[in-house]
Amino acid sequence: MPIQETESIWHNGKLVPWAEATTHVMTHALLYGTCAFEGIRCYDTEHKGPSIFRLKEHIERLFYSARVYHIEMPFTVDEVMAASREVITANKLGSAYIRINANLGYGEVGPYATSGPTDVSVVAFPWGTYLGDDALKEGIRVAVSSWRRSAPGTIPAGVKAAGNYLSSRLITIEAKKNGYVEGIGLAHDGTVSEGAGENLFLVKGGRIITPPHAASILGGITRDAVITLAKDLGYELVEQSIPREMLYAADEVFLTGTAAEVTKVQSVDDIKVGSGNYPITDHLQKTFFGLFTGQTEDKWGWLDPVNQA
């Protein structure tokens, strides 16, 4: 998806013009993938104005990811949260995608680097429906990938870092080359893991089922929100290992993520999902988007208004 440039980027503590937020070609993150990051959506809500969805949880995960990869953070959680609001205001945005990078910068060569600085940037720009204009309503075609997710004890799948997404690149390129919108990766043991950039859910017999953290998934913040909403609505939800063939027997399949939001899957490996009806997915989707219209009560304080009183 092409980037829509805006006026300013928050870079290492101050707003700078978009074109000036640069880094050296020998930055450690470019050489070795040492960049913790977050993608967050800001919604132009009907009742609270521009509001960032689960901002604190995203920033706390950013700091966790940086800690795992030994990336020192030169700012506090509150400072990065404030910067996220600032770029929305400075660029006069309503709905937007916020990308935050915390990467090891220029100074050393070699995987073990201790003296290089950490560069932190917060970028915001307009962004629409990630998986296609009709994806939310009509659903998408997906295929199980030949590429498997990293096994436990290799690299930490539960950490959101740039280098981890090389796997996602291979999965989604394979899918798109074969005519699908997205690919589904398998865990090291052959069970279902997640999409290239989304968590996966299926519905069978009224129960909602999703792979556990041990299936090499990223514990998505939207995933957690959907689990919370589903339980609040009275649905039975279980986290369990999912064999590939279970996808073909599902009544409904859907993906979640900051980019994907709540997206239906219409077929897996060209096998139609269920009868084509999605009553539970539709209910969850309506409830999720209701957070941004005021139709769903925000019991959990997930909306962070940009223009706070």
Image (spheres, rainbow, N blue to C red):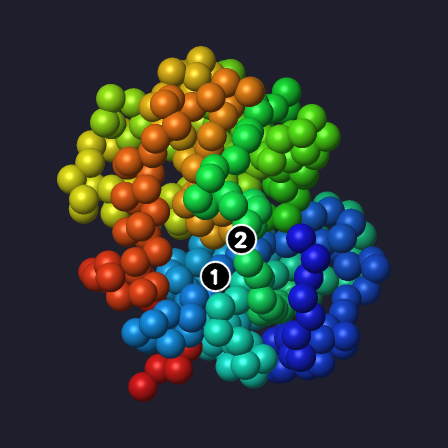
Which residue is under mark 1?
41
- Residue 208 percent coordinates (x, y): 29, 30
Q: Residue at x 53, y 53 (%)?
A: 129
Residue lying at 45% horizontally and 27% vertically, measured from the top left? 215
From the image, state whether disc 2 or disc 1 is nearer to you. Answer: 2
Q: Measuring 16% from the left and 40% from the top, which residue is drawn there?
A: 234
In the image, residue 70 sits, relative to residue 74, either above or below, namely above
Q: Does residue 301 sit above or below 274 in this rendering? A: below
| Mark 2 touches mark 1? (CB < 8 Å) | no
Please, what secondary structure does the residue beneath circle 1 have? strand
Q: Helix, strand, or loop for circle 2? A: loop
| Residue 132 drawn at (x, y percent) | 57, 46
Q: Position of residue 21 (x, y in %)?
A: 72, 73
Residue 247: quarter of image: top left
Amino acid type at image mark 1: Arg
- Quadrant of residue 205 in the image? top left
Residue bearing mark 2: 129
Res. 115 visible in picture: no
Identify which amino acid the numbered label 2 is placed on. Thr
N-terminal label among 2 and 1: 1
Left or right side of 226 for 5: right
Residue 17 visible? The answer is: yes
